[in-house]
Amino acid sequence: METLKKVAGILNQKQNVTIKQVALRAGVSQMTVSRVVNKQGLVKEATRAKVQAAIDELNYRPNLSARRLAGGKSLYLGLVYHNPSPGYLTKILVGGLSACRENGHHLVLENLGLRAPFSEPVKTAEYLAGTGLDGVIVTPPLSDIEKFVDTLEHLGTPVIRIAARNIETDKLHVSMDDKAAVTKIVSHIISKGHKDIAFIKGPETHPSTYHRYDGFIQAMKANGFKVNPDYIVGGDFTYKSGLDAAKLLLESPKPPTAIYACNDDMAAGAVTAAYMKGLTVPNDLSVAGFDDTEIATNIWPALTTIRQPISEMSACAVNLLAANILGETEADTQSAILDFELIERDSITLPNKSLK
């Protein structure tokens, strides 16, 4: 019985740990602890580590219900999307949902592919503004429809954009540097000895298409190579479009030795096109992609690609939008540019000169 009382006392003590106790243990303010817990605001990494250590030592567990109710800080945020890549979309949704759950907010998902944001941006914005959402997260390619975004803001709905074409904008946004990422991966392909490199573009309505094409051009020129216009083929971010584009490229009188596709879905299609042609990847044709979605490792060989922090961008958008709505961030904190990573796998090797 005495042992049970001790256990009950310990459990009760752990359950009653307050944010004030965590702040005292870490030697910081309660606001700083709140920002660490809610992943909001600007906190130095050393301070964040100190607060986290205090949280772990005291076994502090914030009450989710209390966080939702305290000060009316539970927000209803909309995440609007219209994207043909299931891998990209899954990561966007997972990141946004996770951030909302951790911070006591609610995420409302809206597939605008069922509406007409491109042809009727004002009408679509008016519909969203009328839903009573506290703020809206706009994903690509919708993030580049200026009239849609401007109308939402004009109607009083706070907006944050993910991966808009203009990463220098003063509007609230989260992005990564697509141009720098593609410059890096295409330079990597060139370093393996390739110069006849084809490029499968994304849809013209998608902002990242322009950044990635610019990165391709920059890498080719920086290495002293001319861009062959016959090696530039359009796609729409789907597996089928990558398959069709690669078929065209491989029927050329002088086929490329490498294909760079604007996303993993199209790169996977290019791999299949090579097999249908009787070629092997990477021995006869090198292929690379972008995003590092599940398909990059679900095919053989696994794709060399750019790991885009898709889930992280979505989570960051939730936190940055919420912080701005609630006044919990600096006035000039309007953007976040996240890092990318070159992932080297087995789909790129030296060009097969016997095919030339």
Image (cartoon, helix red, strand yellow):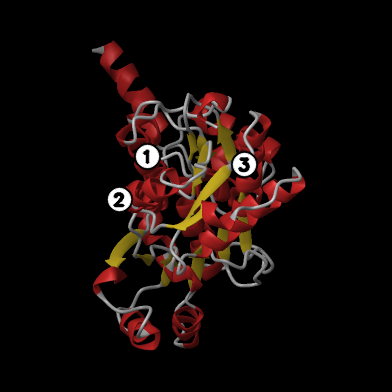
Task: Note whether 152 is above or below 345 in the view shown.
Answer: below
Q: Where residue 311 sits in the image (x, y, percent)?
A: 44, 47
> Crowding at label 1, few (<14), some or many (≥20) Cα neighbours within 10 Å?
many
Judge from the rendering whether residue 118 lies leftward or rightward of residue 327; answer left or right. left
The tag earlier along the polypeptide, 1 or 3, is 3
**What label does residue 186 carry, if any?**
3
Q: Secondary structure at mark 2?
A: helix
Q: Amino acid at mark 3?
A: Val
Q: Is residue 156 visible?
A: yes
Q: In the visual, does 184 lie left or right of 121?
A: right
| Earlier residue among tags 2 and 1 | 2
Q: Tell me the crowding category of disc 2: few under 14, some 14 to 19, or many 20 or more residues within 10 angstroms, Cα based.
A: some
- Residue underneath mark 2: 240
Quadrant in which residue 127 is drawn: bottom left
1 and 3 marks in contact (CB < 8 Å): no
Residue at image x 43%, y 28%? 281
Q: Nearer the viewer, residue 259 or 59?
A: 259
Residue 70 picture location, percent across and down? 41, 60
Please report contact status of discs 2 and 3: CB closer than 8 Å, yes or no.
no
Q: CA distance from mark 2 to mark 1?
A: 9 Å
Residue 232 picture location, percent across and down: 52, 55
Three-letter residue code for mark 1: Ala
Snapshot quadrant of residue 135: bottom left
Q: Secondary structure at mark 3?
A: helix
Circle 1 sits on which residue?
268
Separation (CA) of disc 1 from disc 3: 17 Å
